[in-house]
Image (cartoon, coloured by chain):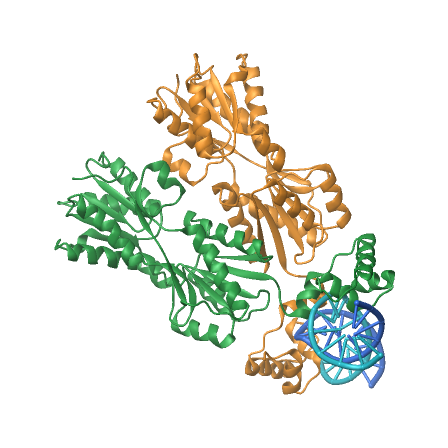
Chain colours: A green, B orange, C blue, D cyan
Amino acid sequence: MAATIRDVARLAGVGLGTVSRVLNDSPLVSPATRTRVLDAIAELRYSPSQIARSFSSGKTLTVSVIAPFFTRPSVVERLRGIESALHANGYSLVVFNVETSARRDACLHDVSRHDRSDGALIISLTPRAGEVQLLRDAGVPVGLIDTSAEGMYGVCIDDIYGGELAVRHLLDRGHRRIGFLGDSEAEVQDFNFTSSRHRQLGYLKALDAADATLRPEYQRYGVHGRSEARLLARELLQLPEPPTAIFAASDTQAMGVLEASRDLQLRVPEDLSVIGFDDIDVAEYLGLTTVRQPLFMSGQRGVEILLGLIGGEPPDPPSQVLPIELVARGTTAPM
Amino acid sequence: MAATIRDVARLAGVGLGTVSRVLNDSPLVSPATRTRVLDAIAELRYSPSQIARSFSSGKTLTVSVIAPFFTRPSVVERLRGIESALHANGYSLVVFNVETSARRDACLHDVSRHDRSDGALIISLTPRAGEVQLLRDAGVPVGLIDTSAEGMYGVCIDDIYGGELAVRHLLDRGHRRIGFLGDSEAEVQDFNFTSSRHRQLGYLKALDAADATLRPEYQRYGVHGRSEARLLARELLQLPEPPTAIFAASDTQAMGVLEASRDLQLRVPEDLSVIGFDDIDVAEYLGLTTVRQPLFMSGQRGVEILLGLIGGEPPDPPSQVLPIELVARGTTAPM
DNA sequence: CTGTTAGCGCATTCAC
DNA sequence: GTGAATGCGCTAACAG
């Protein structure tokens, strides 16, 4: 059916190797024979079989990406950065969407049998000790995005500092009763997510530094998402002494807080200040104050690191920390 | 390094073929030898090479998906449906993100050299006549999602009817001055998108049926996105005789309309009714009236069709039309 | 510079 | 039931 390299060689009256050399842009071919081969290729509408090529060379020019809940705006934006950088380097992207803890484990495990791809990028999922070991033993190039692990390479941000940034912004505006709303314990355990927890650590740190009293009841956790956050925020706001500001671990959860304040006829920011995290697309639309992190860039950097690894060059700082910044908009105000 | 099928055969004291048969669940193996092989596999931690397997069998168990602007909420949701269905069938998903007309053409062309995948899914991009021909000649299994083309298979919705649904909703509430806001001519041409245009056709049809006068100045086009839609909507609303309702070709653009009304101190829905299309996630949050289409399902159906095609069974109605419905929320009211 | 050769790891014939 | 042989299309290492 389709022409093979052998057909081309025959038509051009050359050997197999020569055709292969032309295909791979080897300089060891005379211009004359090169054109002859090129003509034959054109005439036969020949296109080299990628599978055969990968099989023979051992390189697939493909990268696997394991992304939890890849419909979340922040994840999609990272994916976009990944796709962009990968494509610029001639690589393809295979996506694995993780929405259950079982699939998480399966994906992380499967990465070690690096067959179909030259390496993998893992978003937000922190490999556990045993998994790190497995990955190392398998010798698979892996890049971590939005997380880090001992002995692994990747790119992340300082979530603790981010949490501090957010809470200090609130403290600076006179707030003392500040609530925190983060991911559920179950989620954190199942997926081994770390950012919500770290942001909370920053929250605690900032509060502590300001000598603000910590109230356990001001900290709530629920399954990531708007609706759950809405419920939790409502609980917070109906406390006898409700917080005057809420720091949500993500913009999506901050949206739930906004809904809750709407439910309770609370004006934002007059009655309640709200701050999120990530600076996803809608944050600007909503005028949401938030902590911005470079999502697209995290994808690009992840690719750079991974391709380096594939090429045998470990990145110098094993884990790169990207800058973050506070973006003050309309949902926070002095109390 | 990694064990091969040969190592397993040697350790189990059997021939290559037998190991292969065990791997492929062939019934032609005695239970005794099967266990012996299985043991050897376990001991060597053997895992068959997927590339070698694809190479030999000709099947890659991989599907390519060409998605324009895959960060758009509607596209992501379709992708989720695709990934889900693909994974359920043991297939992997390679994603190509199209954001320029050049890349669109390149991707559509590359699909015809179906190497790395067993077939392709194309979202929202309608192949042109020449491209359809190329695809047919190449004999690549292709499924279209959110569009249709003569002689091709896929799943879509009736966008014209959707436009009618939206506008009739407005007409029923007494609106006569109804604006339309859709994708720019350039985008439509570059990518060969069809939905915005079709929805507009429905708009015109509904207006015509209601004997409402058509005003060319009520129809505006801009690059898909919130900010552009915001500008266009502002223009519409500052007309000497502004529309009392606006139908946006997508929820994202409807968000721009909402911004514009905020800019101009117009209350929604008291002063202006707004209706979108798609029913993406935030639509509910915004209380946006819209036309809902089954995004996730479109992905699943697309996969079913494609896998059928790969298996040699063309779908019975070549193009499947999914149901849509109007979702009345708070941004539309009687005038 | 160029032609030839030897596998890459597996599925799939075949004989036995 | 099972083992041995052939080839998928290409790259890489070699000899010329």
Q: Is residue B192 left or right of residue A68?
A: right
Residue B273 point in image, percent of width and height: 41, 23
Question: Where, quadrant-wise, is the N terminus of chain A in this rendering?
Answer: bottom right
B62 vs B21, nearest the viewer: B62
The C terminus of chain A appears in which quarter of the rendering? top left
Query: Where residue B248 appears, x then y in whole percent?
Result: 48, 28
Locate residue B331 relative to residue A263 in the image: left or right. Answer: right
Of B38 and B30, the residue lying toward us: B38
Q: Quadrant of residue B264?
A: top left
Residue located at (36% from left, 19% from top): B271
Q: Is residue A98 visible?
A: no
What's the residue at 53%, 63% (across, down)? A307
Q: Does A108 sit above or below residue B193? A: below
Q: How many discs appear?
A: 0
Q: Nearer the viewer, residue B199 or A151?
A: A151
> Percent from the top left, x then y, of residue B124?
59, 40
Q: Nearer the viewer, residue B201 or A33?
A: A33
Q: Is B13 located above or below residue A208 in the figure?
A: below
Residue A7 falls left or right of residue A233: right
User: Residue A265, relative to residue A31: is it above or below?
Assistant: above
Q: Is residue A77 visible?
A: yes
Query: Which image quadrant for residue A266?
Result: top left
User: In the rendering, at what x and y percent does residue A83 appear?
Assistant: 53, 53
Which residue is at 22% across, 50% downward?
Answer: A167
Left or right position of A273 against B91: left
